[in-house]
Structures are given as structure tokens and as C-alpha cells.
Image: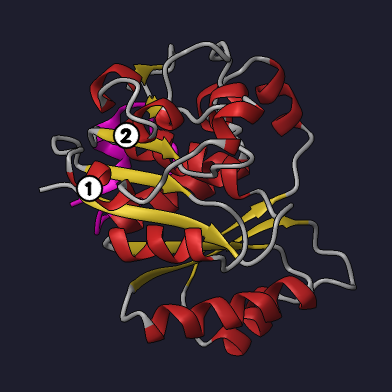
Amino acid sequence: MSEFIAIISAKGGVGKTTASINVSMSLSHFGANTLLVDCDFTSANVGTSLGFPPNFKNLHGVLNKNYCVGEAMHQHSSGLKIIPGSISYDDIKNLEFENLHTLLSELTGPDYIVVDCPPGLTDEVTKIILAVDAVIIVTTPDLIAVTDTLKTLHMMKDLKKKVYGVIVNKKTDQQYEMTLENIKQFLETKILGAIPEDKHFLTSTYYKNPFVFVFPDRESSLEYKKIAADVMGKKYKGSAPLNNQELIF
């Protein structure tokens, strides 16, 4: 049975889409049948980040009933399967997302269906969260982002939604940042992983590939793999070359 996981953030600019791509790629790396769905309706960047042409069939076309969901599913050269969103203003302007819950329920087959959400706590985000099984929240280690994340956690509690934990993104260890221990105490929730700021993310964007695919042994990639292993209920033990050596069962 598929597990639907929404990756959300309280505000934009924290690297949510990058996290969605690399968590999905890491799950796929460990052999899980994984599908990434771009539900950031107004700023759909998954397809662009991975080099898909803008005229590819996408989620917006499915929601507007132009074609079936199977036609909008594509496989990236890295092996990751995605349903991209549209970057067309006309598609955004005319979008009908009321049948999103029904559409997601039709996506049976993958072990994990990761949903990249819009930022914030809008009605659209609430509809997505109600349609999934669990969430992962992305933040940066600054006080404003972490405070907004606390509001998001309270919302998840009200919605009775499972929270895997928080990804702390763009970590630089500058004096003005909150420490991981302080963030954990402030949020009273699990820190799934801490992704350091890395200029190589720009290189992976240039090559239109997930970071963990282009740079599998960098610290950020190891953190994403640790997060994926945690979601799978396994322990990640390092960067051994073979998949079956990387997880402790």
C-alpha cells in the first residue's frame, strides 16, 4: 500500500522543493518505488529543476481533466519518477484542484508518493495535507523560520497528521543561527536531518539532476539518505557502494 508524504514549509525560500527532490531520490536509491508529485500549483519547479520541457504533460493538465494521470507520469534519467506541475500562467489561472484528493487516491503502486506542497498554511496546503498520510517539514535555522515551523506543527496536531520530523536546511553554523539542539527543544519534535549549505547544489541544478545523484558522497547527500532510511524505518550506516550494505535491517 502506498504511503503519501507531503513535504511542507511554513514559508518560501527554505529549500522545500530541493528537499522533496532529494528525499524522493534517496528513497528510490534504497530500492523503494517512489513517485514525486509537484503540487506547488503556482510555483511548480520540480520539472524545471530536473530538465523536463515545459510542454510535457503535467499535474495541472490532469486536474483540468485534459488527460489521465498516467499520461503525466515521467521518469527522469536518474531513475526518479515524477508528475511535474505546469509553469504556464494560463494553466495556473484556470486550475481546478477540488478533485485533488480523488486524483491522489488513484496513484496506487509506488511504495512512497512524495508531494511537494506550496509554502505556507493556505487552504490549498490544508487540502493536500488532509489527502496524505504524513508530513515532513522543512525549515532554515533562523528564528523566524523556526517560529513559523512551530505554528505548522500545531496545525499538524490539530489535523491529527503524522509528522516524521523536521529537516533543517541551509545550515552554515553561523553565530546568528539557532543550534540544532535549540531547534529541537523549541519545536519539541524530531530533527530528521541537517542539510549544510553547499555551493554544489547550484552545480546539480545546472546538470538538471538531484544533488544526491550527482554528488552521492557529500555531507548533504548522506544526510538526505539518512532521512530516507528513517522514513523507511531503517538505520543508515554510511556511504558503502552497494545499496544493500547501506541500510541496517
Which stretch appears magenta? Answer: 232-249
User: Which amino acid lies under the numbered mark 1 shown in the image of this protein?
Assistant: Thr
Could you say where residue 232 lies in the image, as x and y percent from the top left? 26, 53
Residue named by callout 2: 35
Is residue 217 visible in the rendered image? The answer is no
Q: Which residue is depicted at the point 65% across and 29% down?
A: 89
Q: Is residue 239 magenta?
A: yes
Residue named by callout 1: 102
User: Which amino acid lies under the numbered mark 2 shown in the image of this protein?
Assistant: Leu
* View extreme (right): residue: 175
* View extreme (front): residue: 94
Q: Is residue 8 above or below residue 152?
A: above
Tell me if 2 is positioned left or right of 83 in this view.
Answer: left
How is this picture coloured? secondary structure
Is residue 138 visible in the rendered image? The answer is yes
Could you say where residue 137 lies in the image, as x and y percent from the top left? 52, 64
Tell me if 26 is positioned left or right of 166 in this view.
Answer: left
Q: Residue 23, located in which quarter of the rendered image?
A: top left
